[in-house]
Image (tube, grey):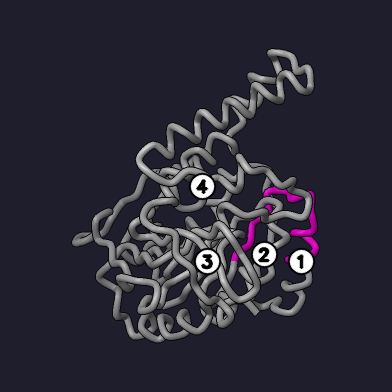
Amino acid sequence: MKIIGIILVKNEDIFIKNSIQNIIKFCDKIIILDNYSTDKTHEIIINIKNKFQNKIEYSRIVKISQSHKYIESYANKKNWIFQVDGDEIFDEKRLLILKKDIKRNKYNNFWRLGGVSLNCTELDNKFVKGFLSPPSKTKGVLFNFNAIKSWKNCRVERLHYGDIVFKNGFNHNKIKILGNNWENSNLRNLHFCFLKRSSKEKEDIVARNAPFEIGKNRYLKSQIRYFTYLIINLIKNNMKLKSLIYLLKKKERLQSLRKIEQYCRGNLVKKNIENIIN
């Protein structure tokens, strides 16, 4: 049973080094796909690849929809596919414990394994603040490709949608969440979805530091704040209507509104992370 990591990146030079290094020992192979970053992400990945040439496969892709083809051939074989983003840092020591369980076939009867994420809003040396999942959205990050016959026509990216043909006894609901809290999960990670992740990225309170309102009306308030932001920029920069429409359609900014709903549930917590980030 092999563990194949797949990382999809786009301008992630702040966290990408730790993101890769913390999964090196866990994975038998790591596929890194760069959507033509313009910051230092490419250079950082090349430096790491040179140290682990037998383990890391690196390519640059024009469209993220191309990413699934890199793992499609692993279906119907004894492989676990490990989905990682460039703004996620997993707990290396806990992963090595999990690796022993996977190699012993402990989770072979499951299609997906999920863990516990800390969606970070603040990072200060040894500590982070953020929102835990659960209760925030929990992702399935390890996929048992021996549970499926094939996975084709995935037109979004990596492990999203498409036509999956399951083997007998498996379906989308065969999911195992490892651990019911941060302290006891062997599949836990820091998710820096609300922090600056590229040296070229401007500090943007709307796009990154999104959880400014927490409560029943947080999503509505975020929308109000977002459109206020657009109107102010329209006036301030004497923008044309064409430019305003562009901003409204901008995928990343619309995603930031959804992030508030998905990743800011429950209470804000503070955790010591000195054993996760070196």
User: CB of mark 4 within 8 Å of CB of mark 2?
Assistant: no
Q: Residue 144: x percent and y percent? A: 36, 66
User: CB of mark 1 within 8 Å of CB of mark 2?
Assistant: yes
Q: Which residues are magenta?
A: 31-46
Front in this rendered view, residue 90 or 113: 90
Front in this rendered view, residue 263 or 88: 263
> Which part of the image, by quadrant, shows the C terminus?
bottom right
- Give yes or no for residue 238 being in the magenta stretch: no
Q: Please give the residue where the numbered disc 3 appears in the rendered image.
A: 190
Tell me the amino acid under the disc marked 2: Ile
Query: Looking at the image, is mark 4 or mark 2 nearer the viewer?
Result: 4
Q: Please give the residue where the numbered disc 4 appears in the rendered image.
A: 211
Q: Please give the residue where the numbered disc 2 appears in the rendered image.
A: 16
> Which part of the image, by quadrant, shows the N terminus?
bottom left
Q: Residue at x 67, y 56 (%)?
A: 197
Q: Residue at x 60, y 59 (%)?
A: 87
Instruction: Please give the count of numbered marks on the rendered protein.
Output: 4
Q: CA distance from mark 1 to mark 2?
A: 8 Å
Mark 1 is surrounded, within 10 Å at the Cα level, by few (under 14), some (14 to 19) or many (20 or more) other residues, namely some
Mark 2 is surrounded, within 10 Å at the Cα level, by few (under 14), some (14 to 19) or many (20 or more) other residues, namely many
Tell me the amino acid under the disc marked 1: Ile
Q: Residue 222: x percent and y percent? A: 50, 35
Tell me the amino acid under the disc marked 4: Pro
Q: Please give the residue where the numbered disc 1 appears in the rendered image.
A: 44
Query: Looking at the image, is mark 1 or mark 3 nearer the viewer?
Result: 3
Q: Residue 245: x percent and y percent? A: 63, 19
Query: Looking at the image, is mark 3 or mark 4 nearer the viewer?
Result: 4
Residue at disc 1, secondary structure: helix
